[in-house]
Image: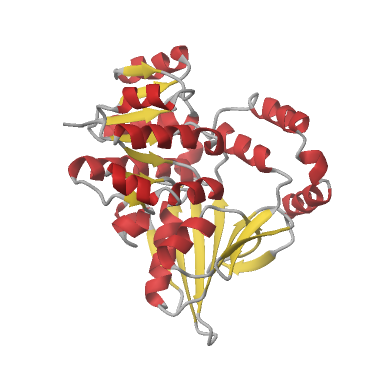
Amino acid sequence: MKEGILIYGCYGYTGQLISEHAVVSGLKPVLAGRDEKKVLAVANKLNLPSLVFDLTDSKLVADKLKDFKVVIHCAGPFKHTSRAMVKACLLAKTHYLDITGEYEVFENIFRLSQEAKDAEILLMPGVGFDVVPTDCLALHLKERLPAADSLEMALFQKGGKISQGTAITIAENIGEGCVIREKGKLVTIPSGSLTKVIDFGDVKRTAVAIPWGDISTAFRTTKIPNITIYNVVPPGVIDSMKLSHYLSFFFRSSLVKRFLISRIKKRPSGPTAEIREKAQTLVWGEAKNPFGVSKSTILELPEGYTLTAWTAVKIAQNILNQEPPHGSHTPAGVYGKDFIMQFDKVKRRDLD
């Protein structure tokens, strides 16, 4: 009988947080990754068993996974690593979780729903800050306004910093444009071209459209055909996004991207524990129906990487305790709109 959790990519910034929180939660996962020295450093620190393997051969990976009930895949950028791990999970009949926010990865995994059903496993990408709270908010708004045909959500991070892994993912996608969902289809628009002033209750901020994972997941969870996700950033960042559109040929260059990534790797791996403790994230959402009726809600959340560790481990625990539905699913689609409400520092305020 399958049992236990494998955390792959345990030595990345978020992978370490998830591994540490799993131990705090009373679990004893097996830690894994392709770099033996880095895997052992984390495993020894947490007194956990470990495995070392890369994702080159899915059949060999499947052999490593065959005794585990669930994998938490933390090794990004996921557009490079998720296909191999998902294929291995299908072969091994092991449930798959990851912490991606890359909409292309969601789209690819949702196409494999029937294969996952045939293998009797769950494929659930995005079990972290990308996209658990926003997915829950999207479903909450859909239930408040069942006839909604438009959904907008905006992220506002107060304090905090991004990790190396997140920064690398951003660098790899720079110059690719922004993506929104329009009439059920994914549509690319110029980066920085769509902005909106958002009222977060006690403060107003200008936000810019970004290709957040909810253009895929919220559509699957709610069936709302028009979805745009915004992020509050400084005006200078918006100007840089617009510039990247006009110089997309330059930023798409592999040489330029390698240079940016090399610079990123010289930075700290991620925010300190002190920064995470003080930081807060707000998520605003508004649903509208064809008659102009709207409903809006704000989620108050702890810092994103901390929340990712909590939600990823909790979903893995749920799978250990009860067999999940098979196929490709979203977090709110399985666990409901109130799943996010169980975590510390989470508040939800309906604005109308």
Q: How many marks?
A: 0
Residue 341 appears in the picture as rendered? no
Residue 184 screen position, x and y as percent: 54, 67
Tell which of 133 and 80 is nearer to you. Answer: 80
Q: Quadrant of the C terminus?
A: bottom left
Q: Position of residue 77 (x, y in %)?
A: 55, 35
Q: Residue at x 41, y 52 (%)?
A: 132
* Residue depicted at 20% across the width and 32% down the height: 2
326 vs 169, left or right, is left
| Residue 281: percent from left, percent from top | 50, 53
User: Dividing the image into 4 quarters, which one contains the N terminus?
Assistant: top left
Relative horizontal placement of residue 208, taking residue 85 as reference (left or right) = right
Q: Which picture quadrant has residue 190?
A: bottom right
Q: Is residue 5 above or below residue 50?
A: below
Q: Answer yes or no: is residue 233 visible.
A: yes
What residue is rendered at 29% in x and 40% in y? 316
Task: Work out which residue is located at the far left of the displayed protein and give it.
Answer: 1
